[in-house]
Image (cartoon, rainbow, N blue to C red):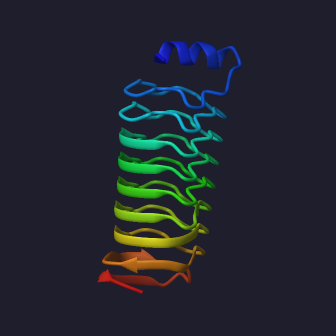
């Protein structure tokens, strides 16, 4: 499907685009609030500054993509695979990443407050200055850089941190942690 066709059908009121092949399609800056892209093929698509608030992206594979400054408030990314994805400055508040695998992703200055990251595997993820306040977190986190990240009020009791960087990281209790390659 082309970007033009998707945008025309969306404008006509259609929201279910599940299992659609959108590989390499440029939807930069589009407003796709509430779209259902469940199990769709999105590898290499352009989604910078795209509004995907309340979108259903369950089970998608996001590979070699950029969501820079995208609006993804309350988006469902459960059971998704994110690999080599740029989410710099993205707003992901109250989104659901449960049971997802997130590898080589940049969440620099992203807002993940209130987000569900339960039973999630993170590997080689950069969360510089990311806001994870009040987020619900669990799973295996390997090589995650949490420099200047905000975890205030987040539930991290079920996270297995391994080889992670905590530098000026605000912890759930409000304390500051500086622990390069620390583990808990």
Q: Which residue extends farthest left?
A: 180
**In screen coordinates, is 18 left or right of 163?**
right
Relative vertical location of residue 53 with respect to residue 118 in this rendering, above or below = above
**In screen coordinates, is 77 left or right of 147?**
right
Q: Position of residue 103 (x, y in %)?
A: 36, 57
Between residue 59 and residue 157, name the one nearer to us: 59
- What residue is rendered at 43% in x and 82% in y? 176
Relative vertical location of residue 41 with respect to residue 142 in this rendering, above or below = above
Relative vertical location of residue 62 with respect to residue 24 in this rendering, above or below = below
How many numbered marks have been drawn onto this rendered protein structure? 0
Q: Position of residue 93 (x, y in %)?
A: 59, 53
Q: Which quadrant would the C terminus be assigned to in this image?
A: bottom left
Residue 24 occupies quadrant: top left
Q: Which residue extends farthest right?
A: 13
Residue 47 is at least partly visible in this image: yes
- What residue is rendered at 50% in x and 72% in y? 139
**In screen coordinates, is 8 left or right of 148?**
right
Q: Position of residue 99 (x, y in %)?
A: 55, 60
**In screen coordinates, is 98 left or right of 129?**
right
- What residue is rendered at 42% in x and 57% in y? 102
Q: Position of residue 16 (x, y in %)?
A: 66, 28
Residue 145 occupies quadrant: bottom left
Residue 171 is at least partly visible in this image: no
């Amino acid at each position: 499907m082309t970007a033009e066709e998707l945008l025309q059908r969306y404008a006509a009121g259609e929201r279910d685009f599940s299992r659609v092949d959108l590989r390499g399609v440029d939807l930069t800056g589009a407003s796709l609030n509430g779209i259902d892209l469940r199990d769709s093929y999105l590898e290499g698509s352009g989604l910078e500054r795209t509004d995907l608030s309340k979108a259903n992206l369950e089970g998608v594979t996001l590979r070699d993509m950029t969501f820079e400054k995208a609006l993804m408030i309350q988006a469902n990314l459960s059971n998704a695979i994110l690999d080599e994805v740029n989410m710099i400055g993205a707003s992901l508040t109250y989104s659901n990443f449960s049971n997802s695998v997130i590898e080589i992703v940049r969440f620099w200055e992203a807002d993940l407050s209130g987000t569900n990251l339960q039973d999630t595997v993170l590997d080689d993820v950069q969360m510089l200055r990311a806001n994870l306040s009040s987020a619900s977190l669990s799973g295996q986190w390997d090589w995650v850089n949490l420099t200047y990240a905000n975890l205030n009020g987040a539930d991290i009791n079920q996270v297995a941190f391994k080889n992670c960087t905590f530098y000026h990281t605000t912890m759930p209790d409000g304390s500051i942690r500086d622990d390069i390659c620390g583990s808990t």
